[in-house]
Image (cartoon, rainbow, N blue to C red):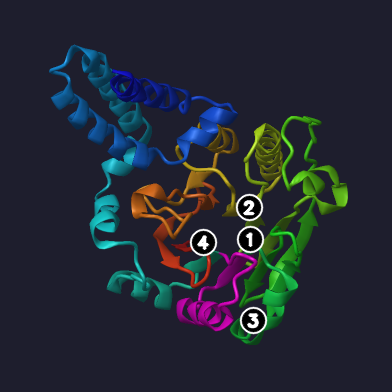
Amino acid sequence: MFKRKILSSIPILFLLASFISLFSFWLGDLFSHFRMFWTVLSVIFVIAYFFLSKEKIYRKSFAFSFFALLINIYGSFSFWTNSQTYEYLFFGSPTDIEYSDKLKQEIENDTTVKSLLLMNLLSSNNEYLEVDALINKVDADFVVIIELNKKWENEFYYLKQNYKYQFTEVREDNFGMGFYAKEQYQDSSKIRLSQHILKIEDFKTNLDEILRTTKNTPVEIQITTKQKYTIFISHPIPPINLESYRNRNNKLEQISENLEKLNSKVLLVGDLNCSPFSADYQNFLKNSGLKDSQQNYGFQPTWNSSLPFLMQTPIDHVWHSEDIEILHRQTLPIKGSDHKAVLVVFR
């Protein structure tokens, strides 16, 4: 009897987790990121408890499972209604560049068409040749590297030879980053946005030193190109507890305020440690006026790439102002990293 009570209680907990994931607070944010997987799990629960509902103890469990399914479908509807989601689901994420013939012609003939490759390398990764080969193969106009450390900076061969203009923040704490371009940019700067550190003794993590030491606060890189694109690169601290969650949100708010001052086309690029299923993510897009480049291109998760497709989530993003048109977007595997690369073509 005890086991049956436990079994009948699982959908209640699942419904509660699904419901709070719709709201903007730490636990809600934490539960929201794997919405696609929760949706599939909801379907399994509905089917299982439908057959079990012949017994009275499981009838409410079926109802709870059904309501959890509705919540998760609501939270991920735009992805499930995009055909490319199913293409990725059944045939796997792309392992090669998938430019159409029309896009190839536009890239060749239209000088306003540009490409950007975003890569979170994983600082402990040592697949130097494989990563350099991927950068060579993609041959993007701009390359953004996240988790850039001295070891990686020394090992890049293709980048050094072919991307003459480089602007980097090399660090050993997973918050280094670099910008590489084939053509000259007009202006560049490193911006340290205040973290508004909260002293919460109950949430000790190995990020304490980063959070509490001003000089170690992750910086942003801001680049203005000759075409008057402003490319803003960021890697906020992951929201693994209440303190770091508030710090990430403060960082996003300050980025939004900074972008409002710019009089140019804008790309916000980086590992932003936030997924499209989060209420905080949606609030940021609303407040900043930026668009998600993933829109209309299906579900393109980037982390954790070692997990099954629907258990991954998109946290590496290219957001853009309305005056930028996204012509192509896809992910690519990065050898040795737990992230996938994001490739966008835009004008």
What residue would you read off at disc 4? 338
User: At 59% across and 38% down in the image, what residue appears?
Assistant: 288
Q: Which dot marks residue 228?
A: 1
2 or 3: mark nearer the eye: 3
- Label 4: how many Cα within 10 Å (few below 14, some 14–19, many 20+): some
| Labels 1 & 2 near each other (Cβ < 8 A) | yes
SS at mark 1?
loop
169 left or right, relative to 49:
right
Instruction: Identify the mark nearer the N-term, 1 or 2.
Output: 1
346 left or right, relative to 299:
right
Instruction: Identify the mark nearer the N-term, 2 or 3.
Output: 3
4 or 3: mark nearer the eye: 4
86 left or right, relative to 2:
left
What residue would you read off at disc 3? 156
| Labels 1 & 3 near each other (Cβ < 8 A) | no
What residue would you read off at disc 2? 264
Q: Nearer the viewer, residue 122 or 276?
A: 122
| Labels 1 & 4 near each other (Cβ < 8 A) | no
Instruction: Identify the mark nearer the N-term, 4 or 3.
Output: 3
- Label 1: how many Cα within 10 Å (few below 14, some 14–19, many 20+): some
